[in-house]
Amino acid sequence: MSQEFNIEIISPDKSIYSAQVEEAVLPCFEGQITILKDHIPLITFLRPGLIELENKKKFYVEDGTVEFSNNNLLILSASAQSLKDIKNQNIESMIKDTEEKILKNKISDKQKYILNYKIETLRQLN
């Protein structure tokens, strides 16, 4: 019996990834969430981090929503990118821009929390 479920990662303008997988690890505000076949239905939000699939594919996301039901995982994110498409120069630039946002602007604690997760994730990639 197969232990796979459907996953689809989409942005507003295109489908980024669609496949059958056995496991997906998601960066959510509640913490890292692992989805396996027959997981309880779930709707939650993504924080900056990596989506990791059991087939070793990884995607960087800054935000988005997640819905899992009937063994279908749907991830909606305008910021999702495959790690293989992100270059080291871009990572350095993204870190610098994010650090400047934290230092220059008056931002809420929630925004600082999110931006710090973004920086932490980007540094892990670099």
Image (tube, grey):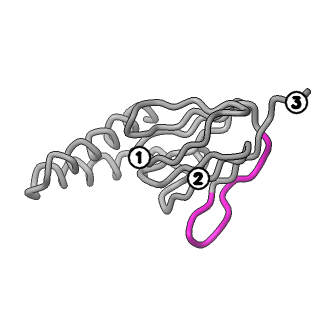
Please state the extent of the stretch shown in magenta in the rendering.
Answer: 10-20
Nearer the observer, 8 or 49: 8
* Residue 12 sits inside the magenta stretch: yes
* Residue at image point 53% right, 37% down: 26
Mark toward the start of the polypeptide (1 vs 3): 3
Q: Is residue 87 left or right of residue 19?
A: left
| Crowd band around label 3 with a 10 angstrom C-alpha radius: few (<14), some (14–19), many (20+) | few
Q: Determine the image quadrant of residue 2.
A: top right
- Where is residue 28 drawn, in percent x and y? 44, 39
* Residue at image point 48% right, 49% down: 61
| Crowd band around label 1 with a 10 angstrom C-alpha radius: few (<14), some (14–19), many (20+) | some
Q: What secondary structure is the magenta-colored segment mainly?
A: strand
Identity, as a three-letter code, of the amino acid under mark 3:
Ser
Numbered label attached to residue 106: none
Alpha-carbon distance for marks 3 and 2? Answer: 22 Å
Identity, as a three-letter code, of the amino acid under mark 1:
Ile
Q: Secondary structure at mark 1?
A: helix
| Crowd band around label 2 with a 10 angstrom C-alpha radius: few (<14), some (14–19), many (20+) | many
Which residue is label 3 attached to?
A: 2
Q: Residue furthest right?
A: 1
* Residue 111 sits inside the magenta stretch: no
Nearer the observer, 9 or 41: 41
Mark toward the start of the polypeptide (2 vs 1): 2
Which residue is label 2 attached to?
A: 75
Numbered label attached to residue 91: 1
* Residue at image point 55% right, 53% down: 81
Q: Quadrant of the C terminus?
A: top left
Q: Secondary structure at mark 2?
A: strand
- Where is residue 65 drawn, in percent x and y? 49, 53
- Which of pointers 2 and 1 indicates the residue nearer the eye? 2
Identity, as a three-letter code, of the amino acid under mark 2:
Ile
Q: Secondary structure at mark 3?
A: loop
